[in-house]
Image: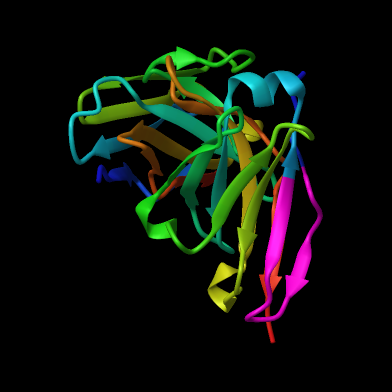
């Protein structure tokens, strides 16, 4: 069974940088896109963007463009989501998920989520 | 930018009830619509893709239909394990979007 394993919870201060990770299998990173989804406390799911690890083609939802950076490392089959300067509004749980693009366009395998808390 | 609007936002039902959730798209999305289930503290799970196809392992009491701009997810006999929040999702033009969610709670 395919799995995505995310890094652990983070507590940061406003203005700090952060990079969270999502590790999958060689098969997943060779053939699929990896996406990131934000869920603020008590709120719904928000699509952030997706990356194709094989060539690093990245597609951001416009509202997240410039706010975060999505990257991937094929040598370690790991995707990343990073911030250069966190804000309190970045407090959320972030999910990575495998995105099937081409026939169904869905997230079919999800990570367990990484909780990020940004507080003075 | 396509918007997805779900109704209702919250739904109270009893075990055994038939439950229907609607997702309306602001533009024609053909049948490129998926449904997810999320329980508190857990990651979402894919239920339905291409508007009506059950993902592997999803119980047959779930069904979905629709095309164009109006879609429905039906739970034919609600079970305790089905109490959760349900989201529709579409991907188009290099970006995706989710509906705002429908919380199915116990009456």
Residue A89 to residue B105: above or below: below
Q: Residue at x 48, y 45 (%)?
A: A49
Extreme residue in the bottom direction: A120
Q: How is the image coloured?
A: rainbow
Q: Nearer the viewer, residue B98 or A14?
A: A14
Indicate the quadrant where residue A30 lies.
top right
Residue B103 locus on image (x, y percent)? 49, 47
Q: Quadrant of residue A13?
A: bottom right
Q: Position of residue A52 (x, y in %)?
A: 55, 31
The verdict on residue A17 being magenta is yes
Q: Nearer the viewer, residue A112 or B95?
A: B95
Q: Is residue A113 magenta?
A: no
| Residue drawn at x 70%, y 59% as measured from the top left | A19
Closest to the observer, A36 or B6: A36
Mark count: 0
Q: Is residue B67 visible?
A: yes
Residue A75, x across and y down, in percent: 77, 32
Q: Is residue B107 visible?
A: no
Position of residue A92 relative to residue B8, above or below, is below
What segment is highlighted magenta in the picture?
A6-21
Residue B43 is left or right of residue B29, and the answer is right
Relative to A62, B84 lies left or right: right
Q: Quadrant of residue B39?
A: top right
Rendered view: A114 above or below A17? above
Residue B10 is left or right of residue A94, and the answer is left
Measuring 42% from the left and 57% from the top, which residue is drawn there? A65
């Amino acid at each position: 069974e395919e799995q995505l394993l995310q890094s652990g919870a983070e507590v940061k201060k406003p203005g700090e940088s952060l990079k969270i990770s999502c590790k999958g299998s060689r098969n997943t990173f060779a053939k699929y896109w990896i996406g990131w989804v934000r869920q603020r406390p008590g709120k719904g799911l928000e699509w952030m963007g997706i990356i194709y690890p094989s060539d690093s083609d990245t597609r951001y939802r416009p509202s997240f463009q410039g706010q975060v950076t999505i990257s991937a490392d094929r040598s370690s089959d790991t995707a990343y989501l990073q911030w250069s300067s966190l804000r309190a509004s970045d407090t959320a749980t972030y999910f990575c998920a495998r995105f099937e693009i081409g026939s169904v366009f869905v997230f079919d395998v999800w990570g367990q989520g990484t909780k990020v808390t940004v507080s003075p | 930018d396509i918007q997805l609007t779900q109704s209702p936002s919250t739904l109270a039902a009893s075990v055994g009830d038939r439950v229907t959730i609607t997702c309306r798209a602001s533009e024609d999305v053909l049948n490129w619509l998926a449904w997810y289930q999320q329980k508190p503290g857990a990651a979402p799970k894919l239920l339905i893709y291409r508007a009506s196809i059950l993902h592997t392992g999803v119980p047959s009491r779930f069904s979905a239909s629709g095309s164009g701009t109006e879609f429905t997810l039906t739970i034919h006999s609600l079970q305790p394990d089905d109490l959760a929040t349900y989201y529709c999702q579409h991907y188009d033009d290099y970006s995706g979007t989710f509906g705002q969610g429908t919380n199915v709670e116990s009456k």
